[in-house]
Amino acid sequence: MQSGQDANRNGVLDAGEVTTTAYACSAAPAETRWVNVTAATAQAESNTGYLANASGPVVLTLPASPAVGDWIKVTGVGAGGWTIAQNAGQRITTIGLPGGNTVGWAAQTLTGTWVATAMSADGARQVAAASTGELYTSEDAGAHWTPRLTGQTWSGVAISSDGLKILAASNGGALYLSTDGGINWSNDGSSRAWTAVASSADGTRLVATDYLGRIWTSSDSGGSWTARDSNRAWRTVSSSADGRVLVAGTNGAQLYVSADYGVSWTPRASGQFWWGSAASADGRRLYATVDTGAVWRSDDFGTTWETVTTSRDWRGIATSADGRYVVAATSGGTLYESPDGGQTWRATADAGAWTAVASSANGLTLLGGKSGGALYAGTRRTSTTLGVSGSLSGGQADALQLQYVGGGVFMPVSYVLANLTFAPQ
């Protein structure tokens, strides 16, 4: 097959006009060579399929020196299932595999009554605020924290995608703004019962909610503010990346959605004690949590809503930019995470009075806070552990094909899952 530009427009590619030549094979693909494995261990060869056919687990070690493009297949035939073991320098990408994107949490040294958290798109710059007056920032994904402002009853924080513009709300006080990552601050001089704030990705369009007051918006990075909608018991607000789509929840009434940067608002969903909210970058997928209720989701810019969890004491919620990876907090319970836009949920972290959560744009870096407890750094798994300590397991009737893509990395090409999840280590 030849391609190129028909420069003389005669309907034919002349020899000098051909820029690319490709070849298509019409022959049937080669059949997979399957090996029936009944022993406890086996060494895999490239471009070969294996039937794990034993009552106990079959450990299949990856090829030690594969070529780019080589593959292996494994299918669990026996009750023992299978485990794919690795050589030094090897790992298996687990993004997209059921059970492959679990979240691990590690407690930080900071403790407080955390009510709000936020982070930059890459997760490097983070901010955490406590109702007891402390506000901290981090520039290294939570490894180290710097105290910034004290003495305010903080209720909400928002941050631009680059992490330099921060908006913080004080309940009964003012709105505080920083344009240098939290080093210097100014405030608007207000004194309102601010409950929540949100920011566009560039930090230009801001929104703030006043409990039993109005929703306020700014289109100039907080230089000026305009009151919107009516006095309501506003509790939460979230924004799309461009600031056009907004969702706001009230305490005991409806959700409200705006599609015009907060100029007008439309009541949606039913009357609930809404607590937290989150929005995908494009605003198509929205989430909202209910105190002693469910997590709600909309996939049409807030027009229609459905519940995606059972009833719990839900608190804060955060999502990746594409709306796929979600983490939600419960008070007196644990953190729950979903790798598939809220279709399935998994309990993670320990129990406690979880209140606030934040997510990076890719959903791999997370931050959670407890009321009267520690801050927790969360990391979503993207692969097995590097080297011989890493592995990937499946059960009876589970099947997986891996392809070598170079650099010691094997990538899933296809899978069949008969059990709940795969098990990466």
Image (cartoon, grey):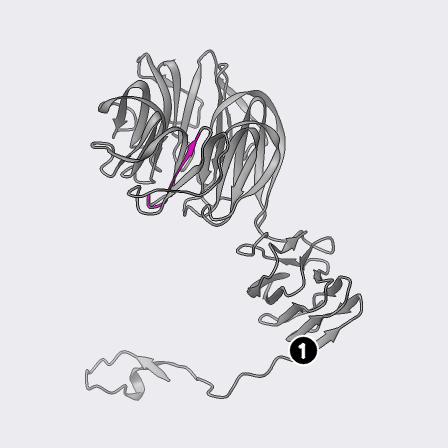
Is residue 169 or residue 386 the one in the foreground?
169
Label 1 is placed on what type of residue?
A: Trp
Q: Does residue 90 show up magenta in the picture?
A: no
Residue at horizontal 28 percent and vertical 88 percent from the top: 14
Give yes or no for residue 289 being in the magenta stretch: yes
Crowdedness of circle 1 by 10 Å Cα count: few (<14), some, many (20+)? some
| Residue topped by disc 1 | 34
Residue interval drawn in magenta: 283-290
Quadrant for the N terminus in the image = bottom left
Q: Indicate the secondary structure of the residue bearing disc 1.
A: strand
At 29% from the left and 82% from the top, the residue drawn is: 17
Coordinates of residue 421 in the picture (x, y in percent): 60, 54
In the image, is 49 to the left or to the right of 186? right
Residue 235, how many percent across, how many down? Answer: 37, 24
Give the image location of residue 412, x and y in percent. 57, 63
Main SS of residues in magenta: strand
Q: In this view, does 414 lie to the left or right of 119?
A: right
Would you say residue 107 is visible in this rendering? yes
Question: Where, by quadrant of the figure, is residue 244 drawn?
Answer: top left
Q: Is residue 119 visible?
A: no
Image coords of residue 238 (percent x, y): 36, 33
Is residue 43 left or right of 354 when viewed as pictured? right
Quadrant of res 401: bottom right
Residue 377 sits above or below residue 425 on the image: above
Give the answer, above or below, for where 124 lies relative to 8. Answer: above
